[in-house]
Amino acid sequence: MEGKHLAVPFSRFFCESFNRFRPFFHWLFDNARCNQPNGKSIRCKIAADIPAKSLTSQKKRIDMLDETTILPLLKDTENERTERTVSINATEKFGQAICAFANDIMNTGKPGYLFIGADNDGKPSGLFFTDELQKNLAGMRSEGNILPQPVMQVYKVTLPKGDIAVVEVQPSKLPPVRFRGRIWIRIGARKAIANEEEERILMERREFNTPGFESEPCLNATIEDLDLDLFHSTLLPAMVDEKEIKKDKRPIEVQLASLGLFYIPYNCPTNAGILLIGKNPTRFIPSASIQYVQFEGLTKGTKVLNEHLFKGNLLTELKNLDNFSEYALQRKRPQLVTALRDKTFIGYPYKATRELLMNICQHRAYNGSNSPAHVYEYADRLEFDNTGNLYGKARPENFPMETDYRNPLISGVMRALGFVNRFGMGIGLVADELKENGNPPAEYILSEPSSFKVIVRSADPLSEQIRTNSEVSKTDLSGSRTNERTNPNKSIEDRLIEIVRVNSTISKTALAHELGIGRTKLYELLATMTHRVRSTGGTRHVEWTVLED
């Protein structure tokens, strides 16, 4: 019997003592390492396994109003964060109040409270809080009249003179919030419909609160999906001072998070982390690739000569794109000027194509499509097609004088690694390089709302000949096939002259094929045309000179 009598007081004493020292236990729980092999506290480990919604609801439950904390708010009739009503059926009034609290026009960052069961003076009306009332109030969140859906809780506080139904509304991260299509806000202790300027303020706050795609957590990925060796060897030294790196003893997750590559609350990389140092970025972000295709002719309907897909992380592919621009896209071609001297033509200058490829990586809307960015090379031009048109302050009317950055984190890393030199200078650099090389100015196609397209024409005279004669000759992939239907009476000699004018390096085998004759017949034909055309070189590598020109 004595044990039973002692058990009740002891249990009460234990619970009261625990509640009294609850903050201390939370502090101890947060800071104790508990011999965790990865250096994390137990609470961090648990938090990584509990959905964010559960953690949020636990935190909100600790902060709920009680009999002591509700009284000052009920009596403060001039408080812009409170509203009172004795009606239990005024759903229109409830919706307007919830919408206004969610918009938090004063940007207090604190919740608003709708008190049901209290008069204008804050005195309880004798309300009895029922399950039906709770369901009706909670249902207002998801019935579709308040958009975006607010974060709110419904609970009761029991006072001596009756219950108070409390609707606690958190400020929205995605304002403006609308109730039945209208934006309600609090102006002091009353509600009002937002004017244009107030709506603009809320929209700007939404843009500020909403992280860009690169900063969002990549929920399906883990730290195992990041190339940490690449992070330590390349990215970290470029972004952080060497002395600071030596002093930094923090866990790897914290180091990654400090550079925006890891999202600690969800224990996963950010999209920027996957794009920059991910082992397989396209597994999580399908559009994280660039497709290069070389066509032999002037359209996509011609033969594909070469194709490559750049699909690795940016730290790897930026180097590959740099080399690709220098050694593949320049299209250097020597051409005889005299018998003893030749001249090298460069179709596309290295620095210009490199800058355009870097812009694809820097300014891309990676969440805008599942399709890769495209680089198409035709016989006379390059086309760069990127998802995502001008961003932010940049508009067609002020382009290229105004610049803005869709991916500031990725842009900063590229700047630190030396892949971009100065922000906002890329378009000018492209223009200068093209002009110096003899290319026409780049053509920027800004009419498509979801893509940014650039066309660069080749500076090689051969490409110009192909483009000029395309309507007449209907060139195929090498730009050398004549249209016999439009020239039915042209002699075989004239056709030969026209072909070698367009393509002065066509092989004799290909020339015979174009004329529809055998090689023996071609040699006989050439023997009769020595006064009109001359060839130097062998069978495959030939340089043709039209003597008539």
Image: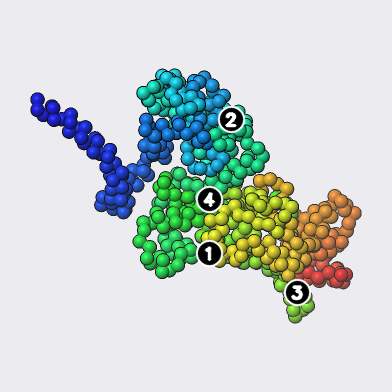
Q: Residue 466's mark?
A: none
- Image coordinates of residue 376 in percent, x first then y, are 67, 54
- Image coordinates of residue 278 in percent, x first then y, are 47, 54
- For the residue pair 197 and 132, the one nearer the viewer reads as 197
Q: Earlier in the sequence, mark 4 or mark 2?
A: 2
User: For the residues carrying marks 3 and 2, which lies nearer the camera in this image?
Assistant: 2
Residue shown at the point (58%, 32%) measured from the top left: 191
Give the residue type that dot 2 points to: Phe
User: For the residues carrying marks 1 and 3, which lies nearer the camera in this image?
Assistant: 1
- What residue is disc 4 on? 214
Q: Earlier in the sequence, mark 1 or mark 4?
A: 4
- What residue is disc 1 on? 416
Residue 245 visible in this rendered orientation of the protein: yes
287 lies above or below 55: below
Q: Would you call the spot at circle 1 few (<14 residues within 10 Å), some (14-19), or many (20 or more)? A: some
Give the residue type that dot 4 points to: Glu
User: For the residues carrying marks 3 and 4, which lies nearer the camera in this image?
Assistant: 4
Extreme residue toward the right, this view? 489
Cα distance between the residues tagged 4 and 2: 31 Å
Cα distance between the residues tagged 1 and 2: 46 Å
Say whether residue 131 is left or right of residue 148.
left
Cα distance between the residues tagged 3 and 4: 51 Å
- For the residue pair 236 and 285, the one nearer the viewer reads as 236
Residue 57 visible in this rendered orientation of the protein: no
Residue shown at the point (75%, 80%) measured from the top left: 340
Q: Earlier in the sequence, mark 3 or mark 4?
A: 4
Question: Disc 3, disc 4: CB below 8 Å?
Answer: no
Cα distance between the residues tagged 1 and 3: 43 Å
User: For the residues carrying marks 4 and 2, which lies nearer the camera in this image?
Assistant: 2
- What residue is disc 3 on? 336
- What residue is disc 2 on? 179
Q: Would you call the spot at circle 3 few (<14 residues within 10 Å), some (14-19), or many (20 or more)? A: few
